Amino acid sequence: MSRRTITVLGATGSVGASTLDLLMRAPDAWAVEALTANCDVAALAQSARAVNAKLAVVADEGCYAALKDALAGTGIEAAAGKAALCDAAKRPAEIVVAAIVGAAGLQPTLAAVERGATLAIANKETLVCAGDLVRAAAVRSGAVLLPVDSEHNAIFQVFDHAHPERVTRIIVTASGGPFRRSTADEMRHVTPAQACTHPVWSMGAKISVDSATLMNKGLELIEAAHLFPVTPDQLEVIVHPQSVVHSFVEYIDGSMLAQLGSPDMRTPIAYCLAYPERMATPSARLDLAAVARLEFEAPDYDRFPALGLATDALRAGGSAPCILNAANEVAVAAFLAGEIGFLDIAAIVADTLSRVGAGGVASLDEVVAIDSAARRAALAAVSRRGVSAAKPRQAAAAARRQA
Ligand code: NAD
Ligand code: MG
């Protein structure tokens, strides 16, 4: 059997590492074209050697010399810069795993879609800020979009793609994050470390904070609206702390279909890699007797305002999701840097949405311009709030000194 060719964008992250783990378990089945990272040279070079990639790319040009050194004598090509990321995505791999975090993944993901690759999409921010463009490009090129995000992967597995009119609702499950039971006052004082300690999943810092604010679930509703032919009214969220049921699809006869599994990203990633076949994974099998109980509760929009902001942006459409996403990326980065408090994240997103007027988006240039305008407005909001958040900033500086 000939090897399948694959490129992993964002290879050094949490999803990237889970993908490489699967590839390394079946080295005869895969030929790795390219791996990319932002600037984590050591991890990228080590992975590129381990899977014998043809090319390794760092987004940050300042990291090029270190990458070249780290790959000396291996025959693996090194490249750097944003254009090099897109060039990597354009190289002829059958499957591209889009696992960069944030809107930084937009151009390389779009480059892979435009050449008609099969995309395993984890990078939800790309769909949130430019889902219409990505879908249109996929229709033109024949690219296949397969969702890696566990909820969307679950929906994809149980959705009747031939008869979408038979679907009445999609119910996206949410773990509820680490502050499911916390009061607003308790959340005001949480630290980045507490926000990044997810009760069920082990993930990158940005998505961990998004899970704690429930912005992640809001972004996922917008993602679902792009991946499945349903209206915003047909999309709902249910909190399910065990994270065993990865989402539901309800049909006109009242049946609900769901996909279940242990919370291990290797299962949805493997589904995408093997599609339309299936492949074995080392993910833990569900022990239903040990799980014992599956709980469900309605989300609390008062304590988690980010979810309402995202739902409103989904309904408004146009550039609103792009503004929401950009503001959230800036606010989460500021929170992780200790510049603002946890509750400031949603406040900054709301502030940015009220200042940057939403409209239509017809081109990639427009998306980039709206994203930049929203980032500027969000940064200004961070500096306004940062003054009142001096305490967490001092605490973070102290923590950095200790580390
Ligand atoms: P992560 O932070 O662990 O890794 C991000 C990757 O992107 C790294 O390889 C990093 O080097 C690269 N990167 C960061 N900034 C970049 C930039 N400016 N330019 C180019 N590359 C850059 O993130 P993650 O948790 O693996 O998440 C990746 C994506 O998958 C996110 O969009 C996230 O929402 C989504 N996702 C993650 C999980 C999960 O379990 N981690 C689950 C579902 C969806
Ligand atoms: Mg998810």
Image (cartoon, grey):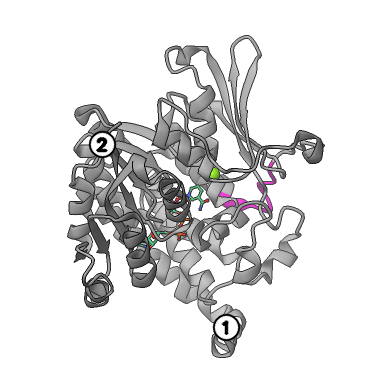
For disc 2, the marked residue is 117
Residue depicted at 72% across the width and 45% down the height: 241
Q: Position of residue 340 (x, y in %)?
A: 55, 73
Considering only vertical position in the picture, is 379 above or below 33?
below
Q: Nearer the viewer, residue 403 or 331?
A: 403
Task: Examine the rendered structure and indicate whether residue 339 appears above or below residue 164.
Answer: below
Q: Horizontally, is 226 left or right of 55 in the view?
A: right
Mark 2 or mark 1, which is nearer the start of the sequence? 2
Which quadrant of the rendered structure holds the C terminus? bottom right
Residue 180, given in percent of the width and then of the height, sits at 72, 53
Quarter of the rendered image showing ligand 2: top right
Horizontal side, residue 251 vs residue 106: left or right: right
**Residue at position x 30%, y 50% in the image:** 106
Under tag 2, what secondary structure? loop
144 drawn magenta: no
The chief SS type of the magenta part is loop
Q: Which residue is mark 1?
A: 390
